[in-house]
Amino acid sequence: MNWFIYIAKCKNGSLYTGITTDLKRRLIEHNTNNVKGAKSLRGNRPIKLVYSEEYKTQTEARKREAAIKNWTREYKLKLINKSRISGFTL
């Protein structure tokens, strides 16, 4: 099973970073009243996936998630924009 780190953009423009094994399911959880969706996003729906990376283990994904969460918004936006420029699609 592969793991994904992802960055989602909220309705209010904020960025949310998380990990999952199923991007589609996780976005549905965040965008609905599913109890598994992050409570912090409930007032900022809908959210839109803007970036993802794939890892073989949960440990690798958690390390990358922690690193990205410590970045400034500016660095996160550069990562998102770089992926779009290089032709990366979600």
Image (cartoon, rainbow, N blue to C red):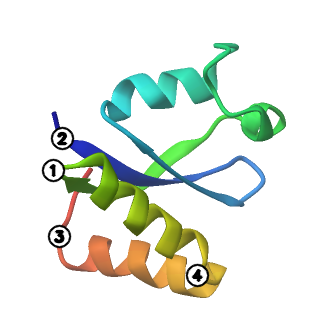
Q: Earlier in the sequence, mark 3 or mark 1?
A: 1
Q: Amino acid at mark 3?
A: Gly
**Crowding near the residue tagged with mark 1, few <14, some 14–19, many ≥20 C-alpha atoms within 10 Å:** few
Residue at which label 2 appears: 2
Residue type at mark 2 is Asn
> Element type at marker 4?
loop
Q: Is residue 23 above or below residue 77?
A: above
Residue nearer the viewer, 58 or 68: 58
Reading the image, the residue beneath label 3 is: 87
Label 2 crowd bin: few (<14), some (14–19), many (20+), radius 10 Å? few
Q: Position of residue 80 (x, y in %)?
A: 41, 72
Q: Nearer the viewer, residue 19 or 47?
A: 19
Q: Does any portion of residue 39 appear in the rendered image?
A: yes
The answer to whether the residue labelled 1 contacts the one labelled 2, judged by CB atoms less than 8 Å apart, is yes
Q: Which of the two labelled residues, at mark 4 and mark 2, occupies the earlier sequence position?
A: 2
Q: Which residue is mark 1?
A: 56
Q: Which residue is mark 4?
A: 71
- The N terminus: image quadrant: top left
Q: Residue at x 41, y 57 (%)?
A: 62
Residue 34, compared with residue 51, is above or below; it is: above
Question: Looking at the image, which residue sits at the far top?
Answer: 34
The amino acid type of the residue labelled 1 equals: Lys
Spatial CA distance of label 4 from label 2 is: 24 Å
